[in-house]
């Protein structure tokens, strides 16, 4: 597992495609854009480009991620769903057989996802604090938890949610924003410290840094022990 993968090959995963050299997912709602992404006709159906400057999992795939466990039919808990840019691609990937529970603390931001959720039918937006999973106890056990909350205790919050909701052997992914944890430390030192915390509960199956798409971010892919 290399830490730096410049000139990385963009690997294709179940549900991801390359069109015109760009990473794409298959558009669940043909003809509809969610942000300013490109649409392409292909033999797979209509594809939407997945912008690495707008979405950290896309940046991680562009950086040569080898393991991307999100698949059709999965139940996903998404911490920090915001207005739904990344979530719309997760929605394409899990298709109508899957579901995404999207937790967001800001009602102003969450409002923007409501139309997307209604059109797609596989996104459940939830106004709540990810630090307090006891506030949303009705969520079913999930196959994957994704955290992109950019707060100091983001690894602890991920683990707390995984203890409550992640199936045995399930997966997690987290985008670590180094500056949210400690602006005075080198990002590589922050990633090392976060890895130690995460390894108490998970095996790390992949790690990449997200430069040049996102500054001072590390992306972990994890499997519950
Ligand atoms: C970096 S943005 C997420 C971007 C989004 N994941 C995407 O790729 O489209 C971080 C989001 O986490 C939300 N957030 C921060 N703290 C949170 C908390 N404790 N619980 C839930 N959401 C939180 C913020 O309001 C913000 O919308």
Image: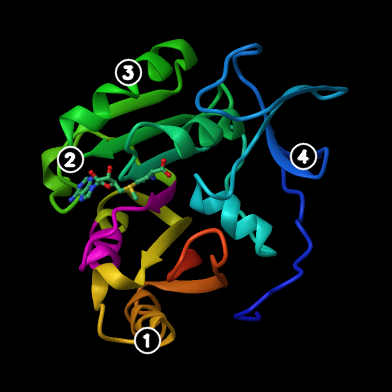
Q: CA distance from mark 2 to mark 4?
A: 32 Å
Which region shows up in magenta? Answer: 144-160
Q: Position of residue 43 (x, y in %)?
A: 88, 23
**Dot 2 corresponds to which residue?**
105
Circles 2, 4 touching at the beta carbon (< 8 Å): no
At numbered mark 4, what does the secondary structure look like: helix, strand or loop?
strand
Who comes first in sequence, dot 2 or dot 1?
2
Rendered position, 52 above or below 34: below
The residues bearing labels 2 and 1 have C-alpha atoms spaced at a distance of 28 Å
Q: Which residue is labeled 1 in the image? A: 186
Q: How many marks?
A: 4
Q: CA distance from mark 1 to mark 3?
A: 38 Å
Residue 21 spot, x, y in % from top left: 81, 45
Q: CA distance from mark 3 to mark 2?
A: 14 Å
Q: CA distance from mark 4 to mark 3?
A: 27 Å
Q: Sequence-wise, which precedes: disc 4 or disc 3?
A: 4
Placement of 193 over or under 145, stated as above or below:
below
Q: Position of residue 33 (x, y in %)?
A: 56, 20
Residue under pointer 4: 17
Q: Is residue 220 placed above or below 117 in the rendered structure? A: below
């Amino acid at each position: 597992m290399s830490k730096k993968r410049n000139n990385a090959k963009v690997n294709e995963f179940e549900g991801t495609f390359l069109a015109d050299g760009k990473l794409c997912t298959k558009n669940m709602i043909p003809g509809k854009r969610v942000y300013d992404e490109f649409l392409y006709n292909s033999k797979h159906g209509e594809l939407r480009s997945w912008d690495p400057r707008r979405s950290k999992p896309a940046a991680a795939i562009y950086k040569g991620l080898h393991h991307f466990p999100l698949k059709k039919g999965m139940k996903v808990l998404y911490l920090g769903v915001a207005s739904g840019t990344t979530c719309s691609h997760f929605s394409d990937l899990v298709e109508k057989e899957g579901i995404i529970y999207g937790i967001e603390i800001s009602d102003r931001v969450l409002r923007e996802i409501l139309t997307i959720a209604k059109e797609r039918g596989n996104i459940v937006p939830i106004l709540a604090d990810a630090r307090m999973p006891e506030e949303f106890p009705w969520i079913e056990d999930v196959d994957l938890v994704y955290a992109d909350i950019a707060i100091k205790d983001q690894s602890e919050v991920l683990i707390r949610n995984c203890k409550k909701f992640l199936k045995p052997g399930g997966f997690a992914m987290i985008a670590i924003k180094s500056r949210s944890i400690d602006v005075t430390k080198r990002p590589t030192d922050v990633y090392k410290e976060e890895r130690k915390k995460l390894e108490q509960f998970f095996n790390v199956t992949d790690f990449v840094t997200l430069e040049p798409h996102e500054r001072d971010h590390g992306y972990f892919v994890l499997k519950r022990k």
